[in-house]
Image (cartoon, coloured by chain):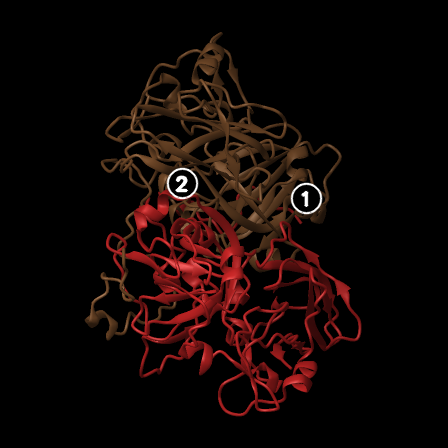
Chain colours: A brown, B red
Amino acid sequence: MAIAAIPAAVSAEEMRTLGAARREYGERSQFERSARLFPPASSTPMTGASRSPLQDQFGIITPSALHFERHHSGVPTIDPATHELAIHGLVERPQRFTMSLLKRLPSVSRIHFIECGGNAGREHRGNSGATVQQSHGLVSCSEWTGVRLSTLLREVGLKPAARWVLAEGADASRHARSIPLAKALEDVLVAYGQNGEALRPEQGYPLRLLVPGWEGNVSVKWLHRLHVIDQPMMTRDEAASYTDLMPDGKARAFSFEMESNSVITSPSGGQQVEGRGWLEISGLAWSGRGRIEQVDVSTDGGRTWRQAELQAPVLSKAFTRFRLPWRWDGQEAVLVSRSRDETGYVQPTREAIVAARGMKEGPDGFNHYNGMKPWKITREGMVTHV
Amino acid sequence: MAIAAIPAAVSAEEMRTLGAARREYGERSQFERSARLFPPASSTPMTGASRSPLQDQFGIITPSALHFERHHSGVPTIDPATHELAIHGLVERPQRFTMSLLKRLPSVSRIHFIECGGNAGREHRGNSGATVQQSHGLVSCSEWTGVRLSTLLREVGLKPAARWVLAEGADASRHARSIPLAKALEDVLVAYGQNGEALRPEQGYPLRLLVPGWEGNVSVKWLHRLHVIDQPMMTRDEAASYTDLMPDGKARAFSFEMESNSVITSPSGGQQVEGRGWLEISGLAWSGRGRIEQVDVSTDGGRTWRQAELQAPVLSKAFTRFRLPWRWDGQEAVLVSRSRDETGYVQPTREAIVAARGMKEGPDGFNHYNGMKPWKITREGMVTHV
């Protein structure tokens, strides 16, 4: 096959036309349509969740414009020039920190995922037909920059009775969660940067807590207050909600850690595989306990497994991209992934989770559901959840 | 100091008001004004360069909307549904690759900087008064996803005489550069992803070459053709331009590698330090030869040096964020940084570069200038280039 030096798709006219001009703040191409997903017909469009299009994501960084969101009373508009973080309670020197004071303090940058505790919560029911965005879109990963919470707590001085830190947001719901002091001193950040620029409004502009590896709602957004206390505050979102009902009628509370999870994002539900032959199976794995150590992929519904390649650098409590080349023979196939983290914990099957926690009634799903998700490819190349 | 439970900045009215609604594709806060910089009064606004606001960047990922740009005939509008990459010349099986075919092939993601060969090129003249954006804004860093060029060249099969690969863009200037085959097979990518989504138009949508560590203009954008050849093509941009004139009247050509560099971004030119006391000195270091091994910072104009902390992970041919806490005593100070990469190469002073390469006349600057940049802080806290 001979190929002309100039590809056919380019006309002589195009070759003589200057392109678009420079812009102060760029936008994506007019041909890109990837979007966050939320029910369009809500009577309270200010509040709820939007889900990230994981099927369209490359690599491990979620574009800030497509990061999932979850809030209980909409996205507040906060002027950073007047915003303050108050730290009070069981501390020696209560203090208000302006944004400019926070930015003088020693900072760190960390790539971490955030996952809503309710992500994939309805998947315990089995075949839902949900795309990966519909079922798993409440997780995203960014490079966060800010001050260690331990630095701030050293500034104000902890009193001996200090055991927990209540973090409160400046949104209308005053969303608040209690965090054990050990975690607060370990790796929690008070973050003002996301993917190289200021936090996006939906992610807490101008200031948020970032609690690596824990259910998303403890990473309190629009952070304006830290109250150091001696026991958890038992706020609405740690007593009435974000608990895990067990079959015996008791509920687990303060189940903070997001356990090892993974999902294949390509090919995935709703997509069409165009013809047999080689293609790349790709997906995301993550664990709130540390680094992903291994991801296995099955193309026969879990009977046999092959080890996927993990994209370096593999970072703790961050998305890990896995990939496996696969030759589709045009027959029915069932693709599924399974992750193992550095603690040795292996992602369970749906059946194992249901055996432990039972089925849940009503429209809501489980919190902390991390079962494997199988995708079926039909002979026509259609991909669906099974 | 007592602190009320509810910070003063929040009114009772705000507490009862729902915030903004969800959006399919998010935008930054209305309070954020960081922007790419370019001369406003250009008679050809389609073409030229825009510079990234390094002074506002957190961490190592440059927001795609603020990535620097450089092009010779504007940003073309390309429909990915019809775009093709042709590979021809000294190959066994010339082939056109559609975007969907490229996305079936094995992919990788890599965090790499891209730097224009002309970045900071006028700084050899010394005190310019330029901010870090004005002098150093032609460098940015992203997570890139795509196919290894070696994978594509294996698909088409190289003939024995193959030595170079000409890469050509689909912009009106048909920007083209010749790349030695050894580099093409080493770590070059044909990239379609940037920071988790499709390339931005200014960075080559829908397809670009990514030549890690080499001067930016070889990472050909809007890539539509790879011509495998036996010697360099001597295109305009490797013969008449992007060469380095030496004092003896000869010019270095094909000086691809960007050498180890660094610059302090905060505090930096044009900024105001608000009062004495502790603050964080922070900046970016990078090397086209591999990993940054060490960054030293001086606050007395280079007489004494302290080692800065490097933010992990330190990645090859990527931005490395460095930080050093410093207590400003309110006196005049001169801040400067110096990087060393894993090859042992140490960033030179301006004086050493001028001694080797002389001074350049005319409005243009050097290519491959990587001298240290000192910032003076006055007693009033004003920061300027010296």
Q: Chain of mark 1?
A: A
In this picture, is A110 found above or below A382?
below
> Which residue type does callout 1 highlight?
Ser
Residue at image mark 2: A69
Q: Residue at x 55, y 58 (%)?
A: B58
In this picture, is A175 found above or below B41?
above
- Residue B368 lies left or right of residue A297; in this view the side is right
Residue situated furthest front in the rendering: B160
- Figure quadrant of the C terminus of chain A: top left
* Nearer to me, B5 or A161: A161
Q: Secondary structure at mark 2?
A: strand
Q: Residue at x 36, y 50 (%)?
A: B26
- x and y percent of residue A304 in the render? 46, 20
Residue A150: mark: 1
- x and y percent of residue B176 in the render? 39, 70
- x and y percent of residue B295 in the render? 70, 63
- x and y percent of residue A179 in the render? 60, 33
**Which of pointers 2 and 1 indicates the residue nearer the eye?**
2
Determine whether label 2 and label 1 are within 8 Å by CB.
Answer: no
Q: Chain of mark 2?
A: A
Q: Secondary structure at mark 1?
A: helix
- Residue B183 lies left or right of residue B276; in this view the side is left
Residue situated furthest top in the rendering: A248
> Which residue type does callout 2 highlight?
Glu
- Residue A199 lies left or right of residue B44; in this view the side is right
* Residue A51 showing in the rendered view: no
* Residue B248 showing in the rendered view: yes
